[in-house]
Image (cartoon, rainbow, N blue to C red):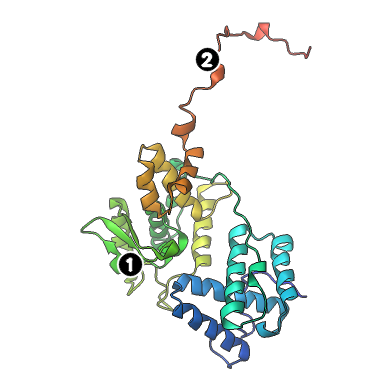
Amino acid sequence: MAGFPLGEGPFLGLLSRGGKASAVGQFCDQMERDMRARGFSAVTVETYARCMRNVVKYFMRPPDRLTFEDIRKFLEYLSSDRSVGFSGFNQYVAAIRFFYSSTVKQDWDVRQFAYQKRLKRIPQVLSVEEVTKLIEGASSIRNRALLMTLYSGGLRLSEARWLKVEDIDSQRGMILIRKGKRKKDRFVMLSKNLLLVLRELFRATRPKVYLFENPKTGKPYDGGAIQRAFHKARRAAGITKRVSVHTLRHSFATHLLESGTDIRRIQLLLGHQGVQTTELYTHVASNYINTTQSPLDRLPLPPATASQLSTTQS
């Protein structure tokens, strides 16, 4: 099997739109129709289609000619050789399960393609000072507005990407987030500072539908472009932490918690289904940690001087 760099370029016309019609392209079109009929969001349709394009690109064979063992080896390749994170890995599993149970039905038990368990990692966050430097490091008004939008309301990348001009309610001071995770709409606050920058962005770019609209296509900028804008600003700000666009969402929640905002209100703003997910931020909020006295400080120990402490081990 030939490996490939994930997400790199179109696959020679296979599973792509335009150009000569192919059986493989028809599979992709049918998959998209199946997903839309089931009410999948545009983001999910796009993600699943990308995953299946990469599956086909890996084997250089149409998807209806792949075997159960082929798919199992592909998932092993993602996990072992490519070290794809659990979230990306699970997107592939979901796309494959859907494709081979709905579009190209095989006599497989697709449930044997197992999801990876999520690791309960403590989220990486930026300090208030680092977020300020990041925004100041933006290379354009569009990128500045994008970073401010992500941070100001704790938006996911896909949520910010698909924002429409009409979703900004300046009269009520709110932003409508359409079909977030689990297809739920929600509102977040509209920062006054953000509104000023968005007005400047509108005057400069005149978007027709989407707030962050590619003028060449009339569609939102893709996720890769947003990630690149983020990392360009990160480098300009001198931030060396291993962070991503999603770190701004973590930072939003942590900073609200540190400023005394009720955790259930943060849960609603983030669109979390349960407060247990939001409680993860108590592990990084400084006011939950550095204001708690260590039991060592309650011991009746006399202050020690340097002369009293031996520098050699006994």
Image spot of residue 42 (x, y percent): 45, 73
Residues 112 and 249: in front is 112
Of the residues shown, which amino acid type is indicated by label 1?
Answer: Ala
Q: Which residue is mark 2?
A: 298
Residues 221 and 290: in front is 290
Q: Indicate the quadrant containing the C terminus: top left, top right, bottom left or bottom right.
A: top right
Q: Which residue is mark 1?
A: 204
Residues 240 and 273: in front is 273
Question: How much space separates mark 1 and mark 2, taking CA atoms?
Answer: 59 Å
Residues 174 and 113: in front is 113
Of the residues shown, which amino acid type is indicated by label 2?
Answer: Arg
Q: Indicate the quadrant containing the N terminus: top left, top right, bottom left or bottom right.
A: bottom right
Q: On residue 240, which mark appears?
A: none
Residue at x-position 40% and y-position 75%:
215
Residue at x-position 63% and y-position 72%:
8
Element carrying mark 1 = helix
